[in-house]
Amino acid sequence: MLFVRNLHIAVREKQVVRNVSFHLKKGRCTGLVGESGSGKSLTALSIMGLLPKQVAVTGGEILFGDNNLLSLPEKAMRKIRGRKISMIFQEPMTALNPVMHCGKQVVEIIRQHQNVSKKEAHRQTLSLFEKVQIPRPEKIFFTYPHQISGGQKQRIMIAMALANSPDILIADEPSTALDVTVQKEILNLLKKLQQETGMSLLFITHDLNVVSGIADEIIVMYKGEIVEHGESRKIFGHPEHPYTKALLACHPPLDKRLKKLATLDDFLNNDKEKSFQPEEETTEERKKRLEVLYRHHPLLEAEKLMKSFPLQKSWRGKVLHELKAVNEVSFKAYPGETLGLVGESGCGKTTLGRSLLRLIEPDSGKIYYDKRELLSLSRKALRPFRKEMGIVFQDPYSSLNPRISIGKAIMEPMQVHHLYKNNAERKQKTLELMMNTGLKAEHFHRYPHEFSGGQRQRIVIARALALQPRFIICDEAVSSLDISVQATVLNLLNRLKVEFGFTYIFISHDLSVVRFMSDRIMVMKEGKIIEAGDADEIYFHPQQSYTQKLIAAIPILQT
């Protein structure tokens, strides 16, 4: 269907994709795998003719039918783009028009390539919505992107991509930020549609687990080059390149409990290329460790915590409908423990985490920290406790001030709470924190935009540690990171917990990550804790059907 031959791409004259060659077969799914910066998306955008202005193809050809797509004029390319070759973009919220109804955006692409009436385009759009399993198609047609969930936005994008029955569909990280249950539905849907229509599917992802159940063959990219290419069974069963081995090993295993995850460096820096064998924690070791933990009094305790948000008000301001984001939640967290909090988007996890720190004021209930009730304290009286309680936010980039260097961002909490004698001492402490979290001293004067996602996550971890807290909330701290970077950050958090005796509440929608990190797990649904207990017990013997559904949706390698 399509041949990519000796493709070279440069960003401002720096080569970022080198000598990439592969072909797409009719009716087959090819997985293009690699981490951020490997050149996956640039390769896909070059096929679509959508490379940014500062990026240029410097060599090679992309053959589709009788045409070399790289030499086609824009007018001719428009007839192919969206008609013969379509693309599902990585972030649907930025790819969809925020001021245009969802249905009208699909109608637009149908009428762009087909000579049909508005009425017929409307009918086709509703049919597409049904095909991609969007509930209440008529209602969703007249909604705006911000009014629907992430999974529904992704389905709208899929409907747009399929609107003109393309020969080739490129799916760029179509499930990265989705809950595991929604992710599974999207993957099953793409596979079903691909089999029904016979189109070629190029599925781009950084997670081999995700692509294992859908791809017929795998292309692995690393630093702009293809390092391995073959049938899925061969790649998953007998990987050859150290980078492929690392991608397979970095994900938390579900059949055993490890003290440390494998990282990319464990494979790329291993001259003998031996398989990395991380140390396991035996059942007996874990039992003894937990017995010591639970001898203490709880460090933090919540009693019947409530937080609601108004959904609809009358013209007089009376609340007619409200959302109970946190609904009578009670639990205890012990010193040195990692307590996992898992659930899908919108279940109330983040609201609960922020309520515990009074970043959001709860409506009712009690919060005890080290036997002191926090909700009765004034803002001034609460301030000393702020030093002992930290948070690592979900999106590190938006939680950092773009106008101040990362060194000053880490120092700032020390200045606010008057820690250490002067700024010289604070700077010395900041440099120590940076070294502890895997950053370098020369990073002190750099700004947030100059770092990768993994480095920014280390920065916000260092900032959370600046006040030497005893209790830290990690809110989806690794959800947007590449698999190998995620493994490095998780190992870092565990190492710091041992060294400094931290207590974590670890919030995530990924149960496999939560199980690796946690001693106990709480499962949250619609504002309530519906199941709680030992992490292994919850994973292997879940009692609630919702927990069983979450576990069943975890992508497992199809070796």
Image (cartoon, grey):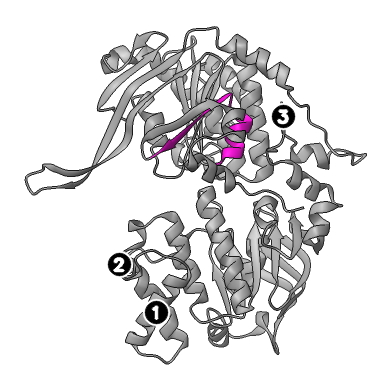
The residue singled out by tag 2 in the image is 139
Q: Nearer the viewer, residue 161 or 55?
A: 161
The residue singled out by tag 3 in the image is 258
Residue type beneath disc 3 = Leu
Going from N to C along the chain, the mark reached first, 3 or 2, is 2
Hey, which residue is sitting farthest left in the picture?
316
Going from N to C along the chain, the mark reached first, 2 or 1, is 1
Magenta-tinted stretch: 510-525
Q: Position of residue 178 (x, y in %)?
A: 51, 51
Going from N to C along the chain, the mark reached first, 3 or 1, is 1
Judge whether residue 13 can be spotted in this image: no
Does the stretch in magenta take in 102?
no
Q: Position of residue 198 (x, y in %)?
A: 64, 78
Residue at 53% in and 39% down: 447
Residue type beneath disc 2 = Lys
What whole-number distance in Å separates the C-alpha atoms at marks 3 and 2?
48 Å
Q: Nearer the viewer, residue 500 or 429?
A: 500
